[in-house]
Image (cartoon, rainbow, N blue to C red):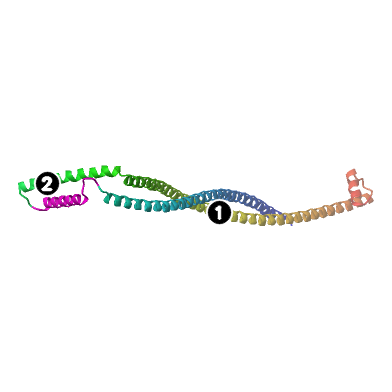
Amino acid sequence: MSDVLPDLEQKRELLRNLVEEHIKKRDELSQESHYYAEERDKLNQKSKSMREAVMKKIDEKGHLIEQIQKMRDEKEAHYREFSELRKELRKNRENFKSTGIDPAELKRKERELQRLEKVQQTQPLEKKEEQKIVLDIRKLTNEIRRSKERMESEMKESESVREISSKVNEKKKVVDQLKKEIDQISAQINAIGEEINKGLQELDETRKKADEFHELFIKYNKESEKEHEEFIKAKNELRDIEKMLGGVRAKTRATRKKEREGELQDKANDLFEKFKNGEQLTTEDLLILQKAGFL
């Protein structure tokens, strides 16, 4: 049976090396999976923070859109009032009675000026005719300008026109201010919209990276578990081999002991025969007889 021992011891050594190899690979793969799990968790936490930031900007944009809608409605209401006031002002100006200026005569001169300008632009004229038309146009232009300036000056002195003009100007200021604020908020909304789009793109990239790390975590974790299973298998085989080695060694020892006892018994028998024949025995011979139970 002792001839089996070398093979078993060789196999045991191979299994010991295999166990160590599986432990090393398992721990390395476990460390890799742990690294990717940590990186995945960091990215997931980052994704959560990024999502909260994006949602905050979306809420901010929503509030600004509501605000700008109210301001637009307010501007439209003021603009309608502004339009009505302008109509009223125009009506007052048209109906204004100027001292010394006949509105009908002023309109006649304006029509005549338009006619002369059209003739000058569209009809072939001799030099004298063209010079006369140029002079007439200049004269009418100056007369119309002076009449309008006089009417404008008189209208400015009119309390009713002045009051409506003041209202028109005040209302225009309100409309212009609202338009300015609306434009500013619109620009702010556009800027936030760009930030949201950028944030969503970065969030998508971060989530994608987190998913990649999660896949790597699963991959290395499975490989680590596989190495652990192989380690358990090799460890069990090693345990079985060591049990077999223990049994073989015990049997070998028992066999050798029996062999030694048999040899001792044979030697004791020979010595005992010598002892009976009266031959001189040494102290060692006597100890052998004593050990064999002859003395």
Identify the disc placed on residue 244. none
Q: Quadrant of residue 266?
A: bottom right
Q: Amino acid at mark 2?
A: Asp
Q: Which residue is mark 1?
A: 214
Q: What is the tally of numbered marks visible in this picture? A: 2
Is residue 165 left or right of 51 when viewed as pictured?
left
User: Extreme front residue here?
Assistant: 99
Of 207 and 185, the residue lying toward us: 185
Rendered residue at 69%/56% (across/down) = 236
Q: Earlier in the sequence, mark 1 or mark 2?
A: 2
The picture places residue 56, in percent across and down from the top left corner, at: 51, 49
Does residue 8 sit above or below 98 in this rendering? Answer: below
Q: CA distance from mark 1 to mark 2?
A: 91 Å
The picture places residue 3, in percent across and down from the top left corner, at: 71, 55
| SS assignment at label 1 | helix
Rendered residue at 40%/53% (across/down) = 77
Q: Are marks 1 and 2 in contact (CB under 8 Å)?
A: no
The picture places residue 256, in percent across and down from the top left corner, at: 79, 53
Please report the bounds of the magenta region as a residue range.
98-123
Q: Is residue 205 visible?
A: no
- Label 2 neighbourhood size at 10 Å, few (<14), some (14-19), many (20+)? some
Of 166 and 27, the residue lying toward us: 166
Of 229 and 208, the residue lying toward us: 208
- Is 119 contained in the magenta span? yes
The picture places residue 148, in percent across and down from the top left corner, at: 22, 45
| SS assignment at label 2 | helix
Rendered residue at 30%/50% (across/down) = 92
Q: Which residue is mark 2?
A: 136
Label 1 or label 2, whichever lies nearer to me, is: 2
Q: Is residue 92 visible?
A: yes
